[in-house]
């Protein structure tokens, strides 16, 4: 088990303040943890936690959240002698956090959507690591570990276990015949024993043999009698991982706008807080996607209802053959979150991609990237996360490296790669009759200092274009240029929606 010394060496030499770390946990919980000597740790404020874990939680591949879950334990301890072993055994972030009993990082990683039941190579989950470590501490002689230190460490493991259990882990999972309830009994962790029973843990008749005294056996059987679920009784509702203190059905499980916390890292992928970054341009909200919270920007809130319905129909592919599920049933447009392509199945997305290829509407490199990631709809706001951009562009690089396309690399990149604003990575100067391209004619484009969107190769071009640009600068109607593939997809969507009976309603206040 990693020691406190290993935490010290990994974190305290490069600590960040709470404000600069932008830890993604509500401030009242951060304060509670840091004020409690049993729980306090500096690891959450280390540069490793900041630069790796927080910035690695970005857009995963289609239909999965796997890239978030598979951030290795070595990200927190890159210089640990155990790093190679962790990689071999698929020891991920929540495993090491549970083994350390790091309460604050457990709060954070669960809020960021890490799977509370993720297994390592041997099938061990975070609750197993937490309770196995608790057993080791409980059985450590007092002359090896001071009694108060044992109390402190056991309190950490109890809290981590509670967080995991209340996220609805499988409380009856077994590793080599050992269940969480058995481990909790071995650790004499009465709080965790009680909570496991309340959430449906099944008592094995041999479990009480793990107690050496009649007093403890009697206490255990009393808990079994009073805390175990009765037949047909459901376990308590899942606690919302936003840590509001409410259960999920009464919090993010309710449809509606749940504001993205201002103190958290901005969703665009910068190293600033949301408050200091994109919150000044567009509101960001969160919704529950079945296993984790997902941030999204709502840029049409003040538009007519028909305009909003058109936008939802476009980003839900709610037209033609695409509005039907693979089983032939009609999808419910109102049930879709206001997020491009959220909750769409992979079959429908692939069918749409093939249609775009068939109609020759998308560049081959763009089409290749569509097979792995949700394709970007240009929204005119800085809502394309750095991770999404990197993943998309890396996939374009895969296409280039495959050698199937004889075009020059720069031409392919210009046709398919995405910038942080959701438009082209290779930007063209907006100056009148200029046409210079980024990375070819100039190393980096300048941006309008007011809207931070429109690119120019020089101050001269910006000055020359100001008369045309002024009326749109910083307004809600301003958008970045589209890639040809994006433009074609948008036009196709509008054309197909025009065939739908609801089209007149959609467009009544839009044109």
Image: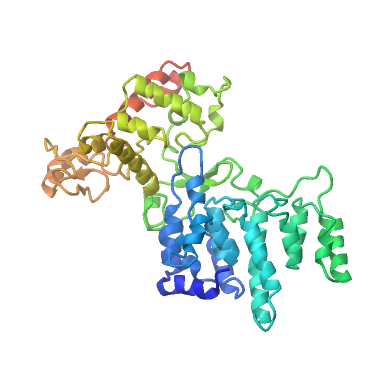
**Residue 39 vs residue 145, the one in the foreground:** 145
Protein image colouring:
rainbow
Q: Is residue 469 above or below residue 501?
A: below
Count of residue discs? 0
> Which picture quadrant has residue 384?
top left
Please indicate whether residue 78 sits to the left or right of residue 242 in the image: left
Residue 404 can be seen, yes or no: yes
**Residue 54 vs residue 464, the one in the foreground:** 54
Residue 468, position as x, y percentages in the image:
18, 37
The residue shown at (52%, 31%) is 345
The residue shown at (46%, 29%) is 349
Residue 220, position as x, y percentages in the image:
83, 63
Q: Is residue 97 above or below residue 417?
A: below
Residue 314, position as x, y percentages in the image:
43, 28
Residue 313 can be seen, yes or no: no
**Residue 48 vs residue 493, the one in the foreground:** 48
The residue shown at (45%, 70%) is 10
Please indicate whether residue 270 sits to the left or right of residue 74 in the image: left
Please indicate whether residue 8 sits to the left or right of residue 451 in the image: right
Please indicate whether residue 306 sits to the left or right of residue 292 in the image: left
* Quarter of the C terminus within the rendering: top left
């Amino acid at each position: 088990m990693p020691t406190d010394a290993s935490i010290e060496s990994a974190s305290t030499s490069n600590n960040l303040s709470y404000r600069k770390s932008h830890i993604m946990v509500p401030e009242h919980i951060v304060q509670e943890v840091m004020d409690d000597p049993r729980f306090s740790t500096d690891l959450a404020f280390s540069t490793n936690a900041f630069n790796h874990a927080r910035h690695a939680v970005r857009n995963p591949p289609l239909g999965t959240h796997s890239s978030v879950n598979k951030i290795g334990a070595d990200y927190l301890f890159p210089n640990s002698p155990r790093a190679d072993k962790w990689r071999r055994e698929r020891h991920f972030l929540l495993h090491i956090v549970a083994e350390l009993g790091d309460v604050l990082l457990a709060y954070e990683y669960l809020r960021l959507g890490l799977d509370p039941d993720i297994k390592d190579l041997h099938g061990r989950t975070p609750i197993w690591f937490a309770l196995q470590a608790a057993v080791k501490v409980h059985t450590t002689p007092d002359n090896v570990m001071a009694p108060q230190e044992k109390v402190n460490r056991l309190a950490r493991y109890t809290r981590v276990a509670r967080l995991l259990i209340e996220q609805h882990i499988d409380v009856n999972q077994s590793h080599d015949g050992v269940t969480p309830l058995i481990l909790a009994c071995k650790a004499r962790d009465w709080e965790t024993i009680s909570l496991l029973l309340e959430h449906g843990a099944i008592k094995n008749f041999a479990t009480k043999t793990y107690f050496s005294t009649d007093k403890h056996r009697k206490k255990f059987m009393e808990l079994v009698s009073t805390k175990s679920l009765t037949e047909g009784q459901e376990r308590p509702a899942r606690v919302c991982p936003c840590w509001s203190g409410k259960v999920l059905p009464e919090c993010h499980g309710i449809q509606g706008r749940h504001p993205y916390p201002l103190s958290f890292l901005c969703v665009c992928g910068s190293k600033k807080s949301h408050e200091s970054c994109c919150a000044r341009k567009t509101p960001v909200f969160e919704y529950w996607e079945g296993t984790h919270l997902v941030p999204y920007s709502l840029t049409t809130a003040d538009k007519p209802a028909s305009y909003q319905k058109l936008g939802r129909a476009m980003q839900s592919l709610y037209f033609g053959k695409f509005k039907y599920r693979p089983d032939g049933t009609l999808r419910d447009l109102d049930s879709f979150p206001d997020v491009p392509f959220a909750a769409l199945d992979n079959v429908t997305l692939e069918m749409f991609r093939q249609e775009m290829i068939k109609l020759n509407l998308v560049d081959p490199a763009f089409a290749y990237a569509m097979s792995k990631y949700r394709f970007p709809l240009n929204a005119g706001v800085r809502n394309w996360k750095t991770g999404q951009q990197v993943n998309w562009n890396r996939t374009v690089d895969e296409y280039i490296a495959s050698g199937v396309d004889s075009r020059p690399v720069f031409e392919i990149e210009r046709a398919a790669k995405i910038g942080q604003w959701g438009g082209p990575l290779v930007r063209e100067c907006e100056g009148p009759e200029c046409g210079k391209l980024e990375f070819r004619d100039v190393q980096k484009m300048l941006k309008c200092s007011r809207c931070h969107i429109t690119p120019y190769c020089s101050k001269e071009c910006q000055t020359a274009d100001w008369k045309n640009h002024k009326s749109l600068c910083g307004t809600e109607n301003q958008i970045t240029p589209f890639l040809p593939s994006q433009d074609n997809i948008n036009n196709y969507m509008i054309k197909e929606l025009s065939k739908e009976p609801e089209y007149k309603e959609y467009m009544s206040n839009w044109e």
